[in-house]
Image (cartoon, rainbow, N blue to C red):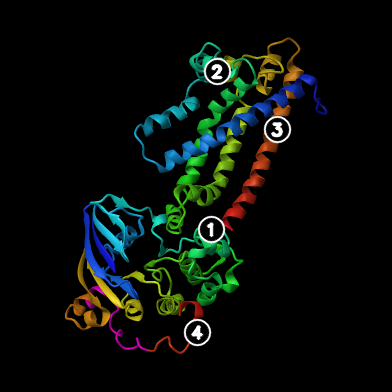
Amino acid sequence: MNLPFLTPLESEALRLSIWVSGWAVLGSLPLGVLTAWLLARRPFPGKVIVDGMIHLPLVLPPVVTGYLLLILFGRRGPIGGWLYDVLGITIAFNWKGAALAAAVMSFPLMVRAVRLSIEGVDQGLEAAARTLGAGPLRVFFTITLPLVIPGILTGVILAFARSLGEFGATITFVSNIPGETQTLPLALYTLTQVPDGEAGAMRLCIVAIVVAMVALVASEVTAKRVEKLTRG
Amino acid sequence: MLKINVKKQQGRFLVDASFTVDDTGVTAVFGPSGAGKTSIINMVAGLARPDEGYIVVNGRTVFDAARGIHLPPEQRGFGYVFQDGRLFPHLSVRSNLTYGMKLVQAAKRTIGFDDIVDLLGISHLLKRRVPNLSGGEKQRVAIGRALLTSPSLLLMDEPLASLDAARKAEVLPFIERLSSELSIPIMYVSHSLNEIVNLADTLVLLDSGKVSSVGRVEDIMNDNEFSILKRKGGNGSALLAEVENSFLPDRPKRLPRFC
């Protein structure tokens, strides 16, 4: 399907970018909230190490992350091999791999936002809910989770934006295949590498800016609405 | 009977309290700030775990270190009114009130929603949002929320301390009515003699984490130790004067269900 004003290559790249980022965020959200909750509320041995591991993709060169993903999730890698043999799923060199790379790269941003938000919830409210007869799980879903929705929203937006811009880990892990793994930044990069690509690159630049602006404005509006709902 | 024997080291502060009182009427735990009142009530509620000892309420053991019993708060069936209310800000007043009630089987509810709303005078607040309530209103809703779980014991931790004098005067009569109209035992923590004289039947005096005296309010008040208590508690001068009839004139008709 072609979008108005865009060439097939451009709409393909845009569609793929949104698809990959969407799956990256949705797929990592439950794990992100759980991790954030564990880090915010539960003391456990090795917490510093876990915290560090989650934040690694933020500070490592993305190429390193991509290469590690390739080693682990390639068809002959320890995890990728198992996925292929047992479940028949291949991740390397297709859009699923691109989503995984984006998820790993954006995970620390999501966890940070949600964790800060959980730390801001008054534990006295949770204690009060316990005395009213609610077990820990019910307290989480009826008290903690509704109160951190603004934080989750921030985390989702940050992670989505980071995923849209993901380049290094993606190109290392799943290469640059049009229609399969060639997201917007990769398409732009490709155009800068060919003669006469400047005009096309500029068009993709504008597309990227428009998408980013729409996402930012939409998140701002939604965040205000949610804030109003939960804080009265 | 309310049998409490708890020991808990908190940093350099040791709570080592042991007392047994009747579980009818209002038992006030009284002492200066930092005497360990809140620690004890939190242990009874299950929000803090004593290092040693036992807590038995009406024959039911909710904590016993020796036998490894430590019921989580949600299984104790006690209501808890906190000093700061702790209403859920994302829920309406009605949803706050029914939060705990819904978790009690309908057959086991001994306290009706309409009765409590009437008793506490909060029927006009039900649709309001929590951030729009005054301090006194919040505290009345918090009391209702705890009562609607049909608790076997109501714990109150300085429920009036965060209110100004006018709001205190607004909420105090409601708490008075609770003890006289519902047959729920109340454990009331306070450092205000005024409140205790108005409310309590039994008094537990607490000092530096230890129980210094237990008995009927009248007995302790007449005891020599009272002078100590007065010195530590502050505003103790006008206390014995007006207990008898202070809130009788505006007492509402008794709720038939609880008689």
Between the C-alphas of marks 3 and 4, the distance is 64 Å
The residue indicated by pointer 4 is B252
The residue indicated by pointer 1 is B89
Residue type at numbered disc 2: Val
Secondary structure, magenta segment, majority class = loop
The residue indicated by pointer 2 is A86
Whether pointer 2 and pointer 3 mark residues with C-beta atoms closer than 8 Å, the reply is no
Counting residues from the start of the chain, the first of labels 2 and 3 encountered is 2
Q: Is B242 colored magenta in this rendering?
A: yes
User: Could you tell me which chain the residue with mark 2 belongs to?
Assistant: A
Placement of B81 over or under A183, stated as above or below = below
**Marks 4 and 1 on same chain:** yes
Please provide percent x and percent y for residue B157.
37, 66
Quarter of the image for the N terminus of chain B: give it: bottom left
Q: Tell me the magenta residue range.
A: B230-244
Between the C-alphas of marks 1 and 3, the distance is 35 Å
Image point (48%, 45%), residue name: A118
Image quarter for residue B55?
A: bottom left
Please provide percent x and percent y for residue A74.
55, 14
**Marks 2 and 1 on same chain:** no
Whether pointer 2 and pointer 4 mark residues with C-beta atoms closer than 8 Å, the reply is no
Which residue, as the protein is rendered here, is positioned at the far front? B107
The residue indicated by pointer 3 is A211
User: Could you tell me which chain the residue with mark 4 belongs to?
Assistant: B
Between the C-alphas of marks 2 and 1, the distance is 48 Å
Q: Residues within 10 Å of mark 3 (few under 14, many from 20)?
A: some
